[in-house]
Amino acid sequence: MKLFVAGMAHETNTFSPLPTSKRAFEELLVRPKTGQGLDRLGDAFGYKDFIRLGEQSQMQVTKSLFCAAQPSAPTLQRDYEELRDEILDDLKAAMPVDMVLLMLHGAQMAQGYDDCEGDIIAKARAIVGPKVPIGVELDLHANVTKAMIENSTVLMVCKEYPHIDFDKRAEQLFDLCLRAQRGEVKPVMYKFDVPMLGAFPTTREPLRSFVGETTAMEGKDGILSVSLVHGFAWSDFPEMGASVVIVADGDMAKAKALAETLGRRFFNMREEIESPLISLDQALDQALAEPKGPVVMADRSDNAGGGAPGDSTYFLEAMLKRGVKNAALSMIWDPMAVQSCFDAGVGATLDLRIGGKTGKFSGQPLDVTAKVTALAENPRQFMFGAVSPLGRSAAIHVDGIDIVLNSIRQQTFSPEAFSELGIDPAKRHILVVKSTQHFHGCFAPIAAKIIYVGAPGTLSTNYLQFPYKRMPRPMAPLDKVSL
Ligand SMILES: [Zn+2]
């Protein structure tokens, strides 16, 4: 049996000030046919599991490209097409194949393409014909489109936010596609649109129980898979939004009925499952009133993992104004300031301009007098077991606050984003992380309290600040919607 695997992932934020070229995809690129990036294979979520499962089942596995870029603006057209065509050319060369497994994101856009995944899957379908199973695994922050559903055999998203289950979903997808290939099941899919925007952590109730309940439906009574798709609110195009996707065994009416029932329940819990956001000032009041630290404060609006620059200064400015001490913040993306710190050396005190450089939602750059406390050429943090290099980084101390400045733009995933630069996160009263929810897995064990903060920024959930032009309306919470 011949299995073809490939992957490409980018969460596209139409409002991000950061352009996306082929270079951005080189940060995590594995190209087995040339040996490029094989040392990062273990970090290639989903894709590495497809390969493992295929090889364990004695399949002949054709490994095409895997690449992933930090969220940012739509990819340049020629660069997207070049990466896509490499995958499709590999597929043509591998034909005939018995099964195709693709690890994609679900909210990828390029110049000239609203729906990159729909485009890739449709073109793959045209190559393999109607009978070969195509299995697609996506991030739950997907805007699932008609083209994705029509051209894949089984499509599912991860269930957890933070996304700790890409490997489990890869196993489920592999198993279902193999059974479909053998004719043991006949997957049919139905998508029910849920017109809402939001960020919905699965670590909190009532969503925690809803995920448990819907997962328990799988494998029973003809239901093969249930995907609660959260949508990605910053991809402005006509098919954006949340949805429920049901894969049933041969029974479309059953898939449709369940998708509608669960979709309405998902929609009706939208206000309860959105993490409670409070303003920066209220959040600092709460944190300072806590007798015990560390209080972990999530600067959700400047999460690079959703396409924000990661260099906003609103949070730091507010803490400096209020004279907050014994606090640490990781990270501000500022390669230029990092260079100055390297030139000054550890122990030096210098006047430094930090952050606020990238876009109108980054705030003003801050002019501070900083003491350089640590420098590191290649510090790393961990993202669901995978390694994420921070790039050349510096730690500085400004008026009682330790700040990590780094060079490879990304959100804060794990406490190593502090400790690799000599800052002991457990000993600080306040820790500020630029992340929406993915920090939760690694920081919850050391946190006395976690506060989600609605500071200004590129990923603010004040959706009215964004110039949406193509979003389908009505859409909650912007409009009154009845479903
Ligand atoms: Zn996601």
Image: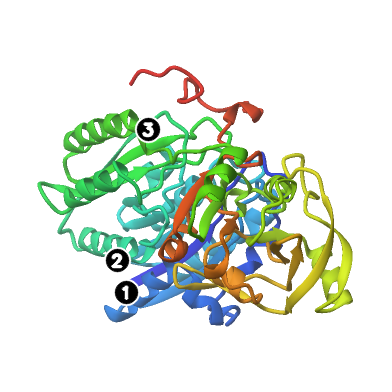
Q: Which residue is mark 3?
A: 270
Image quadrant of residue 127? bottom left
| Percent x, y of residue 362 | 73, 45
Image vertical order of residue 312 relative to residue 392, above or below:
above
- Figure disc tally: 3
Distance between the Cα atoms at labels 3 and 1? 36 Å
In the image, what residue type sits under mark 1? Answer: Leu
Instruction: Name the secondary structure under disc 3.
Output: helix
Q: Residue at x 29, y 66 (%)?
A: 171
Dot 3 or dot 1, earlier in sequence = 1
Q: Is the C terminus in the top left, top right, bottom left or bottom right quadrant?
A: top left
On residue 171, which mark appears? 2
| Percent x, y of residue 85 | 58, 59
| Percent x, y of residue 423 | 63, 72
Dot 2 or dot 1, earlier in sequence = 1
Name the one closer to the observer, 348 or 252.
348
Are the residues flagged by discs 2 and 1 in contact, CB closer than 8 Å?
yes
Q: Is the N terminus in the top left, top right, bottom left or bottom right quadrant?
A: bottom left
For this view, does 55 lie left or right of residue 303?
A: left
